[in-house]
Image (cartoon, grey):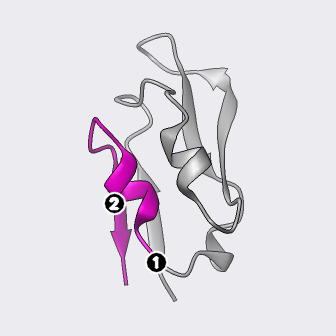
Amino acid sequence: MAKITFQTDACKGCGLCVKACPRDLIALSEHINKKGYNAAYCVDPTKCVGCALCYAMCPDCVIRVER
């Protein structure tokens, strides 16, 4: 099982990871982070397979995927 984590305070909410996830597990939060953005988060981390496509798409390197 993979573990996915986000540095939510550094996320700019660009949504590239949302579009990259083949399992539609990533969404943008309704809550605003310290920088004023809707940060990304994993809707159901137990279903993440660790493909790391979200990690590859993130321009700010705020996603960490562990297998």
Q: Is residue 27 above or below residue 43?
A: above
Helix, strand or loop status at disc 1: loop
Residue located beneath label 1 in the image: 50
Which label belongs to residue 23? none
Mark found first going from the N terminus, 2 or 1: 1
Number of dots carrying numbers: 2
Residue sitting at the far bottom:
1
On screen, residue 22 versus residue 56, left or right, reads right
Specify the amino acid type for callout 1.
Gly
Q: Residue at x 28, y 35 (%)?
A: 60
| Residue density around tag 1, few if under 14, some if 14–19, many if 20 or more, within 10 Å | some
Picture coordinates of residue 64, whole percent (x, y): 34, 60
Give the magenta part as a residue range: 51-67
Q: Residue at x 45, y 76 (%)?
A: 51
Picture coordinates of residue 4, whole percent (x, y): 46, 65
Helix, strand or loop status at disc 2: strand
On screen, residue 59 versus residue 34, left or right, reads left
Specify the amino acid type for callout 2.
Arg
Q: Residue at x 33, y 43 (%)?
A: 62
Q: Give the position of the C terminus as an image quadrant.
A: bottom left
In magenta segment, residue 66: yes
In magenta segment, residue 54: yes
Looking at the rendered image, the disc whose residue lies closer to the viewer, 2 or 1, is 1
User: Could you tell me if the residues under marks 2 and 1 are in contact, i.e. CB atoms within 8 Å?
Assistant: no
Marks 2/1: CA–CA distance? 10 Å
On screen, residue 66 versus residue 41, left or right, reads left
Which label belongs to residue 64? 2
Residue 54 position by quadrant: bottom left
Residue 53 position by quadrant: bottom left
Q: Nearer the viewer, residue 23 or 37?
A: 23
